[in-house]
Image (tube, rainbow, N blue to C red):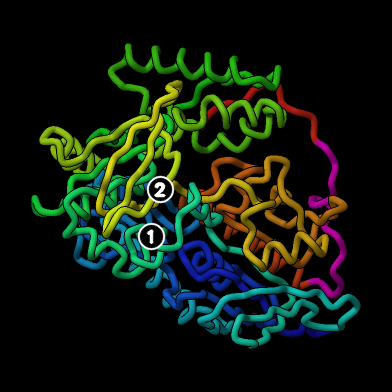
Amino acid sequence: MSTPTQRVAIVGGGASGALAAVHLLREPRDRGALEIDLIDRTGGFGAGIAYGTTDPLHVLNVPAVRMGAIAGRPEHFHEWLAERGEPVAEEAFVPRGVFAGYVRDLLARAEREATDARLRRHCGEVTAIVEHHGAPAAPLELTLADGERIRADRVILALGPLDGGDPIRVPAELKDSGVYVADPWAAGALEEARRDREVLVVGTGLSMVDVALTLCEGGQGPRVRAVSRHGLVPRRHRRTLTNLRRFHIPTETGQIEPIVAAIFAQICRVSQQGDDWRDVIDSMRPVTPALWKALGTAEQRRFLAEFQRLWDVHRFRMAPAVADRFEALQDVGRIVTESNSIVSLEPHGDRVRVFLRIPGATDLDLVEVDRVINCSGAGTDLRRQAPPLLAGLLAAGAARSDELGLGLDVTPEGALLGADGTPSTRLFAIGALRKGVEWEAIGVTEIRDHSAAVARQIVRTGETEEIPLPTELRAVPAAAPTEWEAA
């Protein structure tokens, strides 16, 4: 029996969606043609928010030799740069816009070299996915905001992080006037802010660092005051590559303390050998999902409340040159970071009054600035912050949130779990939507592996005459291992 053409729709055309398409096009097929519909709401295929910036000050926070986007080839990006006549050191931190060009080139190359496969690009926003049960072919129908409809056999959700929205209620007047900037990555969002005298940034993570460097470029721009409840700022990368090594991490109890103790013990060991904590944090990356799953839900919630921010500032670090610029601006008072909570915002002429509270204090601190810029990060509650597409899937029972509500519940292979826990054979997720299940899910390392695994699932299933539920996707609880070793 001949195998019909299989149609796969990828929702989200940023780096995640583009890499899903790349791996689908590259996946060997014994028979049957493949049609891929890659859908992006902005039409900026291959970049997304993370790599859409063209500011050369915005660089990757992973060394070039570890940023390869092809599964099993972490050095591929470094090799690509050399092939183009732009060789860099293995430990170099390259502008993010260059990486976007790399992803686009991978997609174009995979498209040219694929046999019996076709890629179509669509600019639009998917608002709904409906499954037509019993349909003999293309049982999924995607509806776009402009009314266009796309039929598919399988769908990969590559939507990126949830939109966090505003961290506090913002008067409409401040939004309408542009005094409050909800999205610093929107085109032209920071142009007027460059001419301000004083700007308050909500958040002290890597997004804040990018915004602050852009505003203060060339010694011009406003004074930047960045606030968050914790006031912690990302640590710096060292100038040489970290050494990755295995070490024992016990998980028998399913609790955080033994894991934390093992990490600190390893930091002490490597410090005696001339290395530092960065080697330990980076060595944990391959097994972080397994460690996360070994914790019970209560312990995972405890991690989010007590340890997450400390982990984030050590895990997501500033490139050395970025840290140099940032610290130099701090030294001259151009950038100030503080531990403060924003209580409210109030329009005041063409400026804004911000009421702040230091943690543990009762009195409020009033500051007046020209502009407030939101860098508070991605959303953390799918139940409240789901876009219409995901809200529809949840309401229909075709998907369910993970137990923490950070994203979708999925199998190890990325298949969505329905409301009753049944794994889907048609709906898959890659990237940030899997954070609640795997924790380490937003980096290129994870996205390329997600993409490869989902591509194998789709191509393998599509080449069978029927679509039975694969054995490895059945919901059979596995016994928790007694220990993990970091690779």
Q: Residue under circle 1? A: 174
Tag 1: Cα neighbours inside 10 Å, few (<14), some, or many (≥20)? many
Q: Examine the structure image and report whether residue 58 is included in the region drawn in magenta.
A: no
Residue at point 34%, 35% (across, down): 234
Residue at point 35%, 54% (across, down): 347
Q: Give the range drawn in magenta.
A: 464-477
Residue at point 28%, 52% (across, down): 211
In the image, is residue 422 above or below residue 26? above
| SS under mark 2 | strand
Residue at point 47%, 59% (across, down): 70
| SS under mark 1 | helix
In the image, is residue 298 above or below residue 320? above
Left/right of residue 92 with respect to residue 134 in the rendered view = left
Residue 26 in sight:
no
The x and y percentages for residue 332 are 10, 36
Left/right of residue 112 with respect to residue 187 in the rendered view = right
Quarter of the picture holding the N terminus = bottom right
The x and y percentages for residue 13 are 50, 71
Q: Of the residues shown, which amino acid type is indicated by label 2?
A: Leu
Camera-side residue of 67 and 401: 401
- Please identify the dominant SS of the magenta region: loop
Of the residues under marks 1 and 2, which one precedes in the sequence?
A: 1
Q: Of the residues shown, which amino acid type is indicated by label 1?
A: Leu
Question: Is the C-beta separation of discs 1 and 2 under 8 Å?
Answer: yes
Q: Residue under circle 2? A: 345
Left/right of residue 135 with respect to residue 95 in the rendered view = right
The x and y percentages for residue 131 are 81, 74
